[in-house]
Image (tube, rainbow, N blue to C red):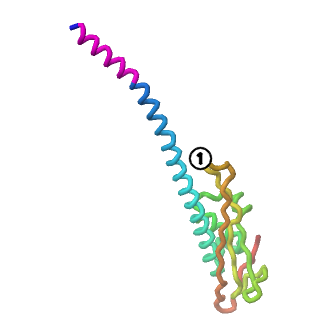
Amino acid sequence: MGDRRATISLRSRRAARSGGSSIVETALIFLPFLAVILGITDISLALYIRQTMQHAVREGVRYAITYQVSGEGECQIPSIKKVVKLHSMGFLSDQQVNDHVTVKFYAPYTGLESGENRPGQLVEVSIENYEWKWIAPLWRNANPLKVTVRSSDRMEGLGGAADPPCLGS
């Protein structure tokens, strides 16, 4: 009977010691695993943001080539910027739209900036140097990702004797 108690006592001491080591082993496996998951999420989100911004400027160009404006008496460039903000899925604030979204018009044959929105001109909508801060800057520096995207197309013709809307700024 005494040997049996000693055996049970020895087993329970071993179990108590191995319980502590299993917690340490779990922590040593879990932390790198969590870092990898956060890294994958971070890179995926960065790619998603870039694609979202590209979609937003593409929609801005589609809006621009048809001479649309968002309200009565509103000029074209502020209307285009509203469309870009709308399609940025909340990633662009009003201040960021003013700081990073640009709309330029170019002469079709020379490629020089013209500042006119006449039929045949080229329009370029871009988001320049939009910054995204990494969620988990574990193995890279904490500098934000800078996203620059552009899209362009040729302005369509105006029906009849219609005049293009004012440009605005």
**Residue 56 locus on image (x, y percent):** 60, 68
Q: Can you tell which quarter of the image residue 95 is in?
A: bottom right
**Residue where numbered disc 1 is placed:** 136
Q: Is residue 9 magenta?
A: yes
Quarter of the image containing the N terminus? top left
Q: Can you tell which quarter of the image residue 13 is in?
A: top left
Mark 1 surroundings: few (<14), some (14-19) or many (≥20) residues within 10 A: some
> Quick one: SS at disc 1?
loop
Q: Which residue is drawn at 66% across and 72% down?
A: 150
Q: In this view, does 22 lie above or below 99?
A: above
Q: In this view, does 160 lie above or below 66?
A: below
Residue bounds of the magenta highlight = 2-17
Q: Which residue is drawn at 56% across and 61% down?
A: 47
**Residue 53 locus on image (x, y percent):** 61, 65
The foreground one among 67 and 30 is: 30
Q: In this view, does 71 lie above or below 8?
A: below
Amino acid bearing label 1: Ala
| In the image: residue 24, left or right of residue 141 | left
Can residue 108 be seen in this snapshot? Answer: yes
Q: Which residue is drawn at 60% across and 77% down?
A: 62
The foreground one among 50 and 88 is: 50
Q: How many labels does the image show?
A: 1
**Residue 127 locus on image (x, y percent):** 68, 66
Which residue is at the far top?
A: 2
Can residue 79 be seen in this snapshot? Answer: no
